[in-house]
Amino acid sequence: MKTALTIAGSDSSGGAGIQADLKTFSAHGVFGMSVIASVTAQNTQGVTAVEDMSPKIIDAQLDAIFTDIKVDAVKIGMVSNSDAIKVIADKLKSYRPRHVVLDPVMVSKSGYDLLQPDAKQTLISDLIPLAGVVTPNLREAAVLTDMRIEGIEGMERAAKAIYHMGSASVLVKGGHLKEEPVDILYDGSKLHHYKGERIHTKNTHGTGCTLSSAIASNLAKGLTLDEAIMEAKRYIHGAIKNSFSLGGGVGPTNHFYQWFGERV
Ligand SMILES: Nc1ncnc2c1ncn2[C@@H]1O[C@H](COP(=O)(O)OP(=O)(O)OP(=O)(O)O)[C@@H](O)[C@H]1O
Ligand SMILES: Cc1ncc(CO)c(N)n1
């Protein structure tokens, strides 16, 4: 069985973060593992508290996995501070996993800061150069590049600018566009557009985590990056289409509709 590791934050309500990642890996038939970098107290209405794990326990979790198990793909999500980012970068440099998908999580859908402002520079200098693909949303791409991004042309410029920070490729996600949600990849030579059809629902908690974990799962299974993204877009479309209301706020994506029916 292929394996995938998520290095990210825990979402107590199960819609985003580590929990969304592990559900996505399972739905792809990939064995999921986790390194918890932060714990968030969170529900469908917002984040109320965050506690970061110490660099020491992040380091120990990474060693425990990599000294024993072959990791086919790594997905990195919320890592909120510089020290944690540095530990992760050091371990990736020594263990060299084949595929690294970096989702540069910065702000929750409800507006809570998940990346400390002074950690942005460390993310750029230490982690982006180790990524096979970086998957910022519009806002994250704007923060990383200090650019204003409104439409497709801005997304293309941002993808190129982030590529020049050192990652092998960049997928700027268009979920927050006013029009159809097209995602744009720059791989150093070409721009690729992955089109989607907008689904009108309030229940989009965890879409970014789900997409990056689906890409990591597909890479673990041996798909090319282009195939991995196309397949992940198909997966996120179904997961949003079958998303559901849970709690009083933004409900989660649905990973299991393929087995348990169109609606839960
Ligand atoms: N309403 C929607 N209908 C169809 N596809 C969508 C919709 N919203 C987002 N997507 C797709 O979902 C994926 C995640 O994109 P999005 O821009 O929402 O990420 P994100 O902002 O990082 O998510 P999160 O807020 O969970 O961190 C992208 O492939 C995007 O095109
Ligand atoms: C722990 C965690 N990671 C990522 C997100 C995405 O916004 C979130 N809300 N919570």
Image (tube, helix red, strand yellow):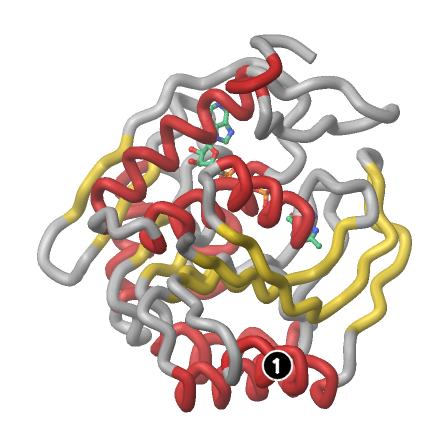
Residue occupying the point 52% across, 46% down: 25
Q: Position of residue 87 (x, y in %)?
A: 58, 87
Residue occupying the point 90% across, 52% down: 48
94 lies above or below 232: below
43 lies above or below 249: below
Give the image quarter of residue 204.
top right
174 left or right of 79? left
In depth, the one of 107 and 5 nearer the eye is: 5
- Identify residue type, mark 1: Ala
Residue occupying the point 40% across, 62% down: 73
Q: Position of residue 215 (x, y in %)?
A: 39, 47
Q: Position of residue 28 (x, y in %)?
A: 45, 39
The quarter of the rendered structure image containing the C terminus is top right
Residue neighbourhood size for the residue with mark 1, other residues' Cα within 10 Å, grouped as few (<14), some (14–19), many (≥20)? few
Q: Position of residue 194 (x, y in %)?
A: 27, 33
Q: How many marks?
A: 1
| Helix, strand or loop status at disc 1 | helix
163 left or right of 73? left
Give the image quarter of residue 54.
bottom right
78 lies above or below 196: below
The residue beneath circle 1 is: 64
Return the residue found at the far top.
262
Residue occupying the point 84% across, 40% down: 43
